[in-house]
Amino acid sequence: MTHLRDLPPFPLLQFYATSPHGCSYLPGRVARSQVAAPSHLIDTATYGDLVRIGFRRSGMFTYRPWCDHCRECVPVRIPIADFQPNRSQRRALARHGRLIPREQPLLFREEHYALYQRYQQARHWGCGMDDDSREQYAHFLLETQVDSHLVEFREGDLLRAVCIIDRLRTGLSSVYSFYEPDVPGAGYGNYAILWQIARCRDLGLPHLYLGYWIRDSRKMTYKSLFRPLEALRNGRWAALEG
């Protein structure tokens, strides 16, 4: 492991690059990640500093893309003070305004896992996540060292969506959302982001971090529809053009 010169000082952490592996988003590409370790020393404050320079987490694993010949994964965030919903997003707010959000302890629930499985099989079939085990699900979404929150959304007694959100000093970080995939015309994914934007406003937080955006990945298109959107390039956050 070596400390890398492009990083601000994190005296207790070390950073290393993983071995090359197939890219999950762009077919035919080879990817690598830069990993921050040890994970038990990455608390909420430290993780917030890492997020601002482009890192994300998957469970206890904190990383950022570190590919040899590709820079397509771009960290993006919504500046809350400037955001205005477009027509489609206003429709999602109106359609799903009856959803009741409830924060729940960050614990395994069969009902949540069943929804997660339906979502993965409908939206990410064949990508490996559709055959996750209960253990993999728990490692991915329920293990954390930071200030994480699980929010479920119900329509009456029906569970419609679940969001995992990290609360940081400079904003909320949207870790992962999954939702009922079989309701025609529903916009639960967009609604979940809009709810998180509103939650940022309630908490007085300036940003909602959405993870990575890839121009040529259809799975990422929805992120670019939330405007204005800021992107991290060359160490600087600036408006995403186009």
Image: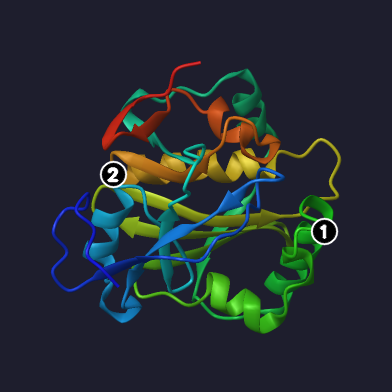
Cα separation between marks 1 and 2:
37 Å
- The x and y percentages for residue 226 are 51, 28
Left or right, residue 210 beside residue 201: right
Q: Nearer the viewer, residue 159 or 144?
A: 144
When the figure is inspected, residue 32 is found, relative to residue 72, above or below; the finding is below
**Residue at horizontal 62%, vertical 18%?**
87
Label ID, residue 205: 2
Residue farthest to the bottom, as pictured: 135
Q: Nearer the viewer, residue 117 or 27?
A: 27
Q: Where does label 1 land, which residue?
A: 126
Residue 28 in view, yes or no: yes
When the figure is inspected, residue 70 is found, relative to residue 4, above or below; the finding is above
**Residue at horizontal 30%, vertical 73%?**
1
Q: Secondary structure at mark 1?
A: loop
Residue farthest to the top, as pictured: 242
Type of amino acid under label 2:
Leu
> Would you identify the image quadrant in which residue 128 lies?
bottom right
Type of amino acid under label 1:
Gly
Q: Secondary structure at mark 2?
A: loop
